[in-house]
Image (spheres, coloured by chain):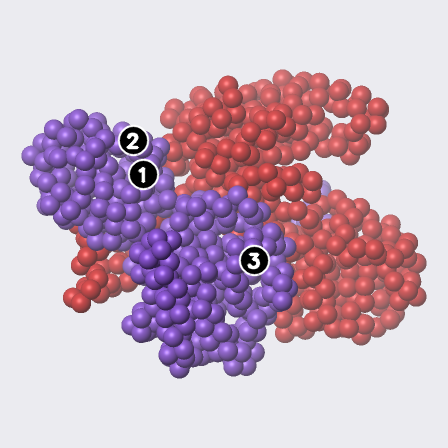
Chain colours: A red, B purple
Amino acid sequence: MTVAQQAARAKEASYVLAALPPETKDRALNAMACALRVHADEILAANRLDLQQARLAVEAGHMKPALYERLKLTREKLETVIKGVEELVELPDPVGRVLAATELDEGLSLYKISCPIGLIGVIFEARPDVVPQIAALAVKSGNAVMLKGGSEAAHTNDALASTLQTALASVPGYPAQALQLIHTREESAEMLALDQYFDLIIPRGGNGLIAYVKANTKIPVLGHADGVCHIYVAASADLEMACRICVDAKTQYPSACNAVETLLLDERWPEKNKKALLETLLKNGVSLFGGADIAALARVSGPVTDWHTEYGEKKLSVKQVKNLLEAISHINRFGSHHTDCILTAEHEEAQIFMDLVDSAGVYHNASTRFADGYRYGFGAEVGISTGKTHARGPVGLEGLTIYKYKLYGNGQVVADYVGANAKPFTHKKIGSKQ
Amino acid sequence: MTVAQQAARAKEASYVLAALPPETKDRALNAMACALRVHADEILAANRLDLQQARLAVEAGHMKPALYERLKLTREKLETVIKGVEELVELPDPVGRVLAATELDEGLSLYKISCPIGLIGVIFEARPDVVPQIAALAVKSGNAVMLKGGSEAAHTNDALASTLQTALASVPGYPAQALQLIHTREESAEMLALDQYFDLIIPRGGNGLIAYVKANTKIPVLGHADGVCHIYVAASADLEMACRICVDAKTQYPSACNAVETLLLDERWPEKNKKALLETLLKNGVSLFGGADIAALARVSGPVTDWHTEYGEKKLSVKQVKNLLEAISHINRFGSHHTDCILTAEHEEAQIFMDLVDSAGVYHNASTRFADGYRYGFGAEVGISTGKTHARGPVGLEGLTIYKYKLYGNGQVVADYVGANAKPFTHKKIGSKQ
């Protein structure tokens, strides 16, 4: 079957999914969880095949060891994923919610109702646990989905997808062709050209992948290119809190996109505090980069050549700023509009920072590492968006929906509402549900 | 100044706009309305210049007479636009609304707050009344905007934009560079390449314009390509209502995108009803297109060669369908996901239609012509979207906003919430406002 044929089938299924009762979707999620447990051995065996090939690639220097680690699926990891699928059952249906209701005139009622987006293409790199995660989010939100995984994980992805497809096919009324898997770069390129079928593309991976996707499709793209997060330590910041938050934001998981990459120190913050904070970071294994003024405070490993740098490891750019406005302006200019934080004792100052910094997440006195769908209480996330249309920040079930307008009349025509004797619209808010 | 420089200034202004108090924005709207009244003579004089050139173009056969009409700005049209600007003052601020509020843990509160999108590029054809309309929507929603009008309306657009810029500059605290105007196709092409500055592009115009924009930018695009709207007359439909609604939907304003283009008649609807409905349409000057079965019912002007046809005039494709599901399937396959209507006495049947038809507007017993921001009660619209991300259907102020997440803590770090002794999240809904 060609990618276009697969897409056509998935699109066809998406129309059915849009009207599926919540119970059917929850039944599908339970079937998926059950099937993943039943077929765990096969899935892990398929993963061992991928790992064998990956090990050879690492030994030959064709693959980074970190990639090998992400490829690895253990029984524990699989169980965590399965629990995630089951947790979605407990969440309310994101589809069919009444977002607004207006009486346009007597007997003419307009409802804005949440509905699925349609057919979504997700392109991801090594991690095979993404397959059941995204598939489950798609089921709950009523979307059809075509997944393109990394070729390194082909056996694992195949085993996962066929397990899930079998599970979906066992649920009466669920169109199993709503879940499709493709493998190669050529297929991926074909998918990006099918704007007649796909409503959204979500690339999950490095900058290269996202830039490639954006450059090669007319389909809307949801994702984030960089995570250049900042912490601004204001003049009134508490030293102990600054140490705790900066260490967490930089070292708790340095390769995460919500890890801090640039520390902005207010010039007016006491010099002994600056020294103590930088010393604490050094003690926690962080290499500092900065100018002569920073070198005068602590040991630096070199200057900063590009303030828009996502290290992804225990390295940190450090800069002194004159005041709040210089900090805001630096962040808006060099940041990636992901998540940025101010440490201050002044609530007023925090408000200005949070209003003027143009990022998906603006934090007061909390680690940037909180930027995550699970921590935000979304149950799960399909990714984090730094775009400014559709969905922003961690994207959960709600970001996988859009809405339609349902208008109920009893024969109304527009001609009655225009011209000299036009009937007026009432535009009254409707309190009760549809 | 280059387009990139104009865009950089507008982007800079957008950061200020995001934190502007509602009073400043409303003061800006009042200043705009006032200036448009004061400078009405100059604006109309500029319009006469454009009209003179347009008349020559029409006489030379280089411009369609309909385009000339749309170019024309009268004192009445201008006053309607000014009233529209003033009406926006009365609407609530779409920015700063608390869309969700969650306590993640004691002392750690997450707020989802509506905010402007940033910098929006709007490309439109002849109609110069779009300039104050879009500028006003941008002001109220806190967005910076760059407008590219048709070259035919260059004098009028210039007069309007400079009047509005002067008005904005007179408002203390309002960054007047938030409104920019460009003129040529080359400038428009430059704008589409500036994805580092623009957050959204809205093309308003024909299919050609929209296809061109989509093919030439990486910036998200909001708009609609076609308006192929359907009315399905079900077996139980009332004849009188069918006549009234079909005549309105086809003839009240045939060139509108929400005018009906295809009529689907259920085979089981009585033959005398079919004949009467088609006869009524013919009497109202509508030319019918259809197969032999339709020709047996009424005079047809020819067969339908493409079911995805937007006539934009008093022409209508007519087809018989076996049942509800065939109608739905035809609409999803050949429609443009704009606005589609079912005429039926059966509420249950209407529900199935409205759930399964994948369009921005799904109507029961009402004319498709109601699909409009003003009629929906949005105050005004920036356009109608048939896309399925961000905003769908008529797009008003709300569609010009996105949101950011504000997280307020007192020193929380993620390390405390992971691992063996992880603190649990509370994820409690916060009732009160920020």
> Which residue, given by chain and number where applicable, does mark 2 sit on?
B305
Query: Is the Cβ of the residue at disc 3 closer than 8 Å to that at disc 2?
Result: no
Q: Secondary structure at mark 3?
A: helix
Q: Position of residue B414 (x, y in %)?
A: 70, 51
Q: Are marks 3 and 1 on the same chain?
A: yes
Disc 1 crowd, CA 10 A, few/some/many (<14, 14-19, 20+)? some
Residue B5, above or below B173 = above
Query: Is the Cβ of the residue at disc 2 closer than 8 Å to that at disc 1?
Result: yes
Residue B171, above or below A429 = below
Circle 2 chain: B
Q: Residue at x 70, y 57 (%)?
A: A335
**Tag shown at residue A398:** none
> Which residue, given by chain and number where applicable, does mark 1 sit on?
B309
Q: Position of residue B144 (x, y in %)?
A: 54, 65
Question: What amino acid type is highlighted by mark number 1?
Answer: Thr
Question: What amino acid type is highlighted by mark number 3?
Answer: Glu
Q: Residue at x 71, y 29 (%)?
A: A71
- Disc 3 from disc 1: Cα separation: 32 Å
Q: Secondary structure at mark 2?
A: loop
**Tag shown at residue B187:** 3
Q: Position of residue A363 (x, y in %)?
A: 65, 61
Residue B38, above or below A9 = below
